[in-house]
Each structure stands twice: as structure tokens, then as C-alpha cells.
Image (cartoon, coloured by chain):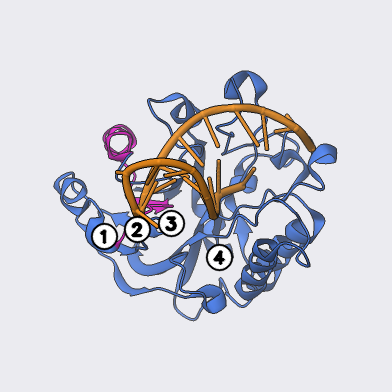
Chain colours: A blue, B orange
Amino acid sequence: MRFSITTWNINSVRLRLPIVEQFLVREKPDILCLQEIKCRAEEFPLEPLQAMGYEHIVLHGQKGYHGVAIISKVPLSEDHRQDYCKVGDARHISAIFERGGRRIRLHNFYVPAGGDEPDRAINPKFGHKLDFVEEMKALKADMPGVSSILVGDLNIAPLEHDVWSHKQMLKIVSHTPVETEGLTEVMAKGGWLDLMRQHVPASEKLYTWWSYRAKDWEAANKGRRLDHIWSSPELGPLLENIEVLKEARGWNRPSDHVPVTATFRM
DNA sequence: ATGACGGATCTAATCCGA
């Protein structure tokens, strides 16, 4: 039996419902985690997604900005929303599902982008991002009786080949040493596995985001791996595949992020 | 690394993304 989970920063779920439906019809993941839904809970398009068999939906909505949702074919329970940095942003939701005799808590994150200037003394958004990452260090993958999966737009490309040019990106927010070291520490302290890099060697370029601002995103190919799928160690051996659906960047009215799907044997 | 794009909102021009 296979089980698949997708993460996708959708940049407005209401505007992009047609491509969400297209994706679900084609790829049929068991669970889809969305970030930047950019709507209140009451504005979320529940009915069309439930009509497609995704009957179990939990979300953390917010007017106009941020917002995360878990859209699932399998029942979800014990949903929880954590207010990281206590600023009232909708940047996290988690819930438990059961599969193959396991209980698994799935966390869906939208980490702050951090603005332009990588200096917290002059850019409060960068400070917010660093504080958010600091708070994530307390999140443990290993919990008694429960496995863990963490997905989302973490807005940090941690490895050299997660960006098109390591050298030219070192002072650019998303790839500065204070961010990449922070994210590495979140993984180490929490005991998380990077499933994307378990499947694709760290020596290969791997991107999930291409800027809207390039004239030709595909020709320029100046991407970054900002979206991630992590798990607790015992799920590592169950990973069968990682698919980064690059073609979705070329769909009609695309998000600047593409869907990333992990498939497990369980 | 600089693009100069794209979304939501006081439906106009501004903030935000990364």
C-alpha cells in the first residue's frame, strides 16, 4: 500500500482553485498541505474539495495573508494551531492521521519570508523570521507513540545546491548562513530527516520555487528549494519517492512554488 | 543578484512576497 503527501505554496487558494483541482485529479495524493491560502476560514473553498473525495479539511485562515490548510482523504484528528512568535499570524497547523497501524502527526508550516535586508537591526521582518526558526527548535520529531511528518514553505534553502548560485546567494535572504545554520539546528535538535535530500543527492540541484519576476523562469532557472518534507527517523525507510512537479510552474496563472509529493510504502 | 511580476485590499495605489 502506498500513501502520499503533497506540500504546495498556492499563493491564494481562491484564485488557484482550478489548478488545485487539476493537480488532485491527476496526482491523487492522500493528503495535500497548502500554504498562503490568503483567506479567512469561512472563505476557504471547502465544498469543491470535499466533493472530490477530500472530505477531511482543517485550516488556519487569516484575511489576505498567510494561512495554511490540510486537505485529506483520510480522517484527521487533534488539529492544533500554534501561534509562533505570538503575533497572531496563521502560519502553522497540525493534525493526526492513522496509517498502517501508526499514528502520525503532520505539521504544515509557512515560515516568514524575512524581507530584503538580512540584518535584524534594520529589518524587523528578518528578526521575526529568525525568532520563528528559533522557536521551531523546540519541535521534536520523536514523540511517544506518534510518528511525525513536517512539511511546508520554510522559506530557507539550506544546502549549497538548493540555490542556483551558492556564492551569489550568501547575502540574500533565504540562503544566509544565519538562516541555513538555524534550519540545520531545527533539524538536528528535533531529530528530523530531510526526506527530499534522502531521495535526491545533495550534489544535485533541486528547486521548488522560481521567481515571478524573471522574464523567462525556465530559461533563467534561478530557483531555490524553499519547500520541504521532513519526518521522524522511523519513517525514512518507508519513503518510496519524492516528486517535484516542475511543470506546474508553467501552468495557467501558476503559483511561484510547485507541488512536492512524498510517497511512502505503508 | 537584480529583476520589475503577481496577489489582496479602503477598487487605487499600496503593502507584501523571497
Tell which of A185 and A34 is nearer to you.
A34
Parent chain of label 4: A
Name the N-terminal-most of marks 4 and 2. 2
Q: Amino acid at mark 1?
A: Ile
At horizontal 69% and vertical 62% (from top left) the residue drawn is A126
Asked whether residue A21 is drawn in magenta, I would say yes
Instruction: Tell me the residue that label 4 is attached to.
Output: A232
Query: Do marks 4 and 3 both belong to one polypeptide chain?
Result: yes
Report how far apart the C-alphas of labels 4 and 2 lie in the structure: 19 Å
Mark 3 or 2: in front is 3
Q: Secondary structure at mark 3?
A: loop
Any mark on residue A182, and which?
A: none
Mark 1 or 3: in front is 3
Report how far apart the C-alphas of labels 2 and 1 lie in the structure: 6 Å
Name the N-terminal-most of marks 2 and 1. 1
Q: Amino acid at mark 4?
A: Ser
- On screen, residue A50 above or below A162: below
The magenta-colored residue range is A16-40
- Estimate how packed mark 4 is, as few (under 14), some (14 to 19) or many (20 or more) residues with alpha carbons within 10 Å: many
Name the N-terminal-most of marks 3 and 2. 3
Instruction: Tell me the residue that label 2 is attached to.
Output: A70
* Relative horizontal placement of residue A58, taking residue A227 as reference (left or right): left
Q: Where's residue A51, x and y in %?
A: 14, 46
The answer to the question of whether label 1 and label 3 lie on touching residues, with beta carbons closer than 8 A, is no
Q: Amino acid at mark 2?
A: Ile
The answer to the question of whether label 4 and label 3 lie on touching residues, with beta carbons closer than 8 A, is no
Query: Do marks 4 and 2 both belong to one polypeptide chain?
Result: yes
At horizontal 42% and vertical 49% (from top left) the residue drawn is A265
At horizontal 24% and vertical 56% (from top left) the residue drawn is A43
Count of number-bearing discs: 4
